Image: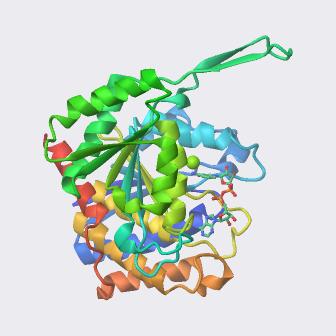
Amino acid sequence: MSHSLAVLPGDGVGPEVVAAALTVLDAAEEKFGFSTERVEVPLGADHYLATGELLTEEAVGSLRGHDAILFGAIGSPKVTPGILERGIILALRAAMTQAINLRPVRLYPGVPTPIAGLTPERCDLVIVRENTEGAYVARGSTVHAGTPAQVAVQESVNTWYAIERAVDFAFRLASARRKKLTLCHKTNVLVEAGKLWLAVMDEVGARYPDVEQDYVHVDAMCMHLPVSPDRFDVVVTDNLFGDIVTDLGAVLQGGLGVAASGNLNIDGTSPSMFEPIHGSAPDIAGRGWANPAGACLSMAMMLGHLGEGEAAAAVESATTSVLADLPALAGEGMGASTAELGERIAERLRDGSAPQVTGSLMNDLAAVMNGLRHG
Ligand code: NAI
Ligand code: MG
């Protein structure tokens, strides 16, 4: 089996962590007998400064032909904040109909967490964030601008179509896991959007009678997540709430160097995109101080999405076992460079010495994607 990949290393530590992830991918291909064709696409600050180009029609056209996109990070102190993020990342998510942002929140054995007393057994959940609507569709207006009477109206767009797409995916994922789905919203205040989300949960939930349903307000979620993450299996939420609670989730699992994400196209019309949640980290770029684990785990998620569940789970196991040995999660204190860590993870994958991660999300994702592909 061969998969065609577009690789977007981006800026700063992006190319460093992506190179490490590709070293690990090489080892996974050897071991599990599949291959990838990789095309590198030069999007990011340097490309923008040299050419003035963000995401062009032509780039979208060529990216669309691939099976998946592996993304590093973009952003540079030389470019005004927002230009690249909106012009490239958000534009890509929209152009590729990446309907879902998937963020696993899993504390792996041996990885330090700032939450006292939290154990890996109690922290293994997945947040499914609707990725196309809500407050992020740039609807709204300003009147009386520049006067003391200035009024800003910011709207949130919620369609049955997009909510159903996210909720159905979340139910499928919960079915493959511990069979519990929690809706996170603020239905007591955002009553119109809330009514729609609840109605979709009811209707779609009827198709998944073996999945237990739960509901939590977003403010209460911020309390439950650090204190009792074991209450959750799969959480589905809207774009804005998802943006916020997933950052809190990343803290539980050891922070920016560790957390992974996927922007999933689930109708098969365009490729999905996988990226560590961190940015280009210009403060440490060029020093080999970036932790490649988030990029490697994102790559594992990509393999799960492509149906290579076994390879995906093995990459997850190798990455997290190397992570558990590190004296620190970032910087000089890691005791090895980004590239050396890539080699170490690849080695552990080859020799199969990492303890196998149980109940891998990467396997669950492969099962869900295979189910979607085959009806
Ligand atoms: P950042 O995530 O790049 O860095 C925040 C802090 O975390 C820094 O101290 C950095 O050294 C550290 N850090 C980040 N990744 C790390 C890793 N893999 N290992 C160890 N430490 C790591 O966020 P910041 O500084 O706010 O933004 C820097 C640039 O990245 C900006 O231009 C921003 O717009 C962009 N950005 C891009 C994103 C993307 O491409 N998806 C996401 C977030 C920010
Ligand atoms: Mg965010």
Q: Where is residue 230 in the image (x, y as percent from the top left)?
A: 36, 62
Instruction: Tell which residue pokes out farthest to the right in this image.
Output: 147
- The image shows residue 252, relative to residue 375, as above or below, that is below
Task: Locate residue 139 relative to residue 242 in the image: left or right.
Answer: right
Instruction: For the C terminus, give its image quadrant.
Output: top left
- The image shows residue 110, relative to residue 281, as above or below, that is below
Instruction: Tell which residue pokes out farthest to the top in this image.
Output: 144
Does the rendering let one see residue 373? yes
Residue in the foreground of this view, choosing between 105 and 37: 105
Q: Quadrant of residue 332?
A: bottom right
Q: Position of residue 191 (x, y in %)?
A: 45, 23
- The image shows residue 52, relative to residue 211, as above or below, that is above
For image coordinates 32% across by 25% down, the residue present is 161
Residue in the foreground of this view, choosing between 87 and 117: 117
For image coordinates 37% across by 51% down, the residue present is 68
Q: Quadrant of residue 359?
A: bottom left
For image coordinates 24% across by 31% down, the residue present is 202
Task: Locate residue 255 relative to residue 355 in the image: left or right.
Answer: right
Instruction: For the N terminus, give its image quadrant.
Output: bottom left
Q: Where is residue 106 in the image (x, y as percent from the top left)?
A: 40, 65
